[in-house]
Image (cartoon, helix red, strand yellow):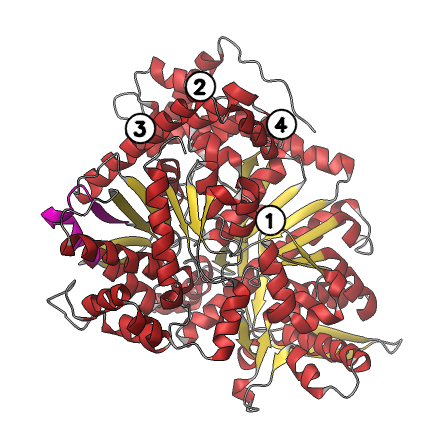
Amino acid sequence: MNRPVRMAAPNEAAALLHSFTNHLLYSLAKDQYSATELDRYMSLALTVRDRLIERWISTQQRYYQKDAKRVYYLSAEFLMGRALANNLINLGILDVARDAMKMLNLDFADVLEQEVDAGLGNGGLGRLAACYLDSMATLDIPGYGYGIRYEFGMFDQEIKDGGQVEKPDEWLRLGNPWEISRPEYGVPVRFGGHVEEHGDDHGHLHVRWTGGEQVVGMPYDTPIAGYGCNTVNTLRLWRARASSDFDLRYFNEGDYEKAVLDKNRSETISKVLYPSDVKVFGRELRLKQQYFFVACSLHDIVRRHLVTHPSLENFPDKVAIQLNDTHPAITIPELMRILVDEHNMPWEKAWEVTQSSIGYTNHTLLAEALETWPVELFQRLLPRHLAIIYEINRRFLRQVMSRYPMDDARVSRMSLIDEGSGTPESRRIRMAYLAVVGSHSVNGVAALHTELLKAHLLHDFYEMLPERFHNVTNGVTPRRWLLAANPQLADAITARIGDGWITQLEQLEQLVEHADDPAFRDEVRRIKQQHKEQLARYIEAEHRVTIDRASLFDVQIKRLHEYKRQLLNLLHVVALYLRVKKNPDLPMLPRTFIFGGKAAPAYATAKLIIKLINSVGSVINSDPQMNGKLRVIFLANYRVSLAERIFPASDLSEQISTAGKEASGTGNMKFSLNGALTIGTLDGANIEIREEVGAENFFLFGLTAPQVLDLQRSGYRPREYYEQNPELKAVLDLIASGFFEPEHPDVFRPLVQSLLEQDTYMLLADFQSYAECQERVSKVFQDPDQ
């Protein structure tokens, strides 16, 4: 590994300061009097970027000289968070920068606070991609991230009258000091048009995709610094630009609007993260986004390969492409198109090259979340790719038939084309199946998830291609989630076991030897209390609700989705409320329940759950009987920088998804890393965390994945649980009565109705087990040493 010994020079702070004042003057044209807080952040960011650039260039030169095999990580999301503190830590100059700011009488924390989160992702999928980039650079692996430079990221969430309101996330409005545009590497991307075939003199068929409209992908590069080493890798994001700015003819005729219409239409491709695909236009735009960034990225990967190699024959020896979920699955037909149409490679050889180069990570167990696209939409936007997918499918189904003769049902189940009801408009392409067939490796993201993929969602494929499936449990980078987010705890750990854990996390096991040291326990407890104090002050400033610092901080922060069961948590909150109302002198452990997370704009049920959380919170927080016992807070606009405040302050981590539904859930790891205990089901990575920390340090409740399946098969009747459990009945009746929203008494009735009639995610079946488990939590929390 390329890791130098880091010695801080005495004049380093002065050198940094010199560079900082130069940028303020020459890059931003400001002096100390006219500079704003934002200018100071920009100057420091540019100063740090300067220190990355030399390493960045020498890293890329080293890869070329070594003719290294490169890893290309294709993801529709990269949830990077803020970069300044992370880069300072990875370069080993955080204290130097703090000293330099002190020389100017600037508050270092205020400067860091000016940075806007890069809003390029939605949840765990995008954050995982960011953690992978950090780890590849730290391990000196030649790695590249490829995605879209969304102008408007995941929306800013505001809470109005208790409900979620989406505002555009204009994260680029004030500029982004970390990116460098590379217009010289623009890539033309085609949509629509038609396919032409012609034979040559040797009887070989040649195919050309022509016509249609073109946009240009413009690359923007961001340096990704490894920790404590000289490696700086690249995240390349693509922005869509019109192939010609506007039509001068229309302009000259005075039709100014029509002159720029095509330009605006083509540039919407990179405008907004994941447009809602409820409307046909939204679906079309999403497919365009996916093909756009895949086409640009593959063009770039092939170009880079051909700089040092005469042909694409050895492509898999030098290139590994990883698909982060199904969004980039169109990589498979696109690479085939490049090899067969543009490089005249025979189909069989091209297929071998494609399969050997591509790996696929699956991120879901929900059948409805597996991406499919209407054949008709493909025909219109990507006619050549549709023909290639048909040919892949034809050849693949021949293999299925010869392996399983006379099994038509299996052939139909495994086809890449879902025939639907048989009408042309109902036929759809199954992108996950395409990804499995076109890759040499398919992985789930937690041990249970991979086993369930093999047993259910992709069972036919596992039976036929067992060697292709394996597990890679997700991880998180300790650099951001402990070293940057919780420096006090990081220092306390390093003082006991050294700093090797920062890159070799398994070294944390050495802490077991210090577990009985009262001084270490006191220090860890004091650090947790400091973070609770900071988070409480933040909540009080934002929400005007007083927080008891000694209360149990019980936290569930993640994307709002029914299977993640924020609603189960809330049913328990209402149960506690009713207990106090019935018996005001009831001795109860004080708790502060903290929720946070965004609901997809078109996901009405998830948005209704947010409203219910806020309505329950507003009743509880204004009831004097609850003072000192219960608080309920919904933190708006959950994002990476807010998560960095919350994880270190949390006592209890809620990982309560229905068993068999959460692929991995990396929030559970960030909580554990910061010393919170978990209450959870045997789901996703909870299982592996429980194995690591020991069953006695994990609050387990609820049905297991096999029990969930059995209950579904035998006919789950949620109403029975409601009728047999007086507390549960009282909770649901109170919510349905309109008590928490007297102005609109019927508003929450659909939630209760759905629980009583379907309860798809079995909240009612798990309620009693969850409530009893929370009693165990209360007992343990009252004994700090335990």
Residue 185's disc number: 1
- Residue 61 or residue 277, whichever sits in front: 277
Q: Earlier in the sequence, mark 2 or mark 4?
A: 2
Mark 1 vs 3, N-terminal side: 3
Q: CA distance from mark 1 to mark 3?
A: 37 Å
Residue in view at x 21 percent, y 42 percent:
542
Mark yes or no: residue 180 visible.
yes
- Disc 3 crowd, CA 10 A, few/some/many (<14, 14-19, 20+): few
Residue type, numbered disc 1: Tyr
Give amino acid for label 4: Asn
Q: Secondary structure at mark 2?
A: helix
Instruction: Please name which of the two marks, 1 or 2, marks the residue nearer to the observer.
Output: 2
Of the two numbered discs 3 and 4 on the same chain, state the one appearing first in sequence.
3
Q: Counting other residues with Cα less than 10 Å from the Cα at mark 4, is it few (<14), some (14-19), or many (20 or more)?
A: many
Query: Which circle's residue, 3 or 2, is located before the other in the chain?
Result: 2
As measured in the structure, the alpha-carbon distance from the residue carrying label 3 to the one carrying label 4 is: 28 Å
Is there CB contact under 8 Å for labels 2 and 4?
no
Residue underneath mark 4 = 230
Looking at the rendered image, the quarter that the N terminus falls into is: top right
How far is disc 3 from disc 2 in space, using C-alphas?
15 Å
Q: Is residue 162 above or below residue 720?
A: above
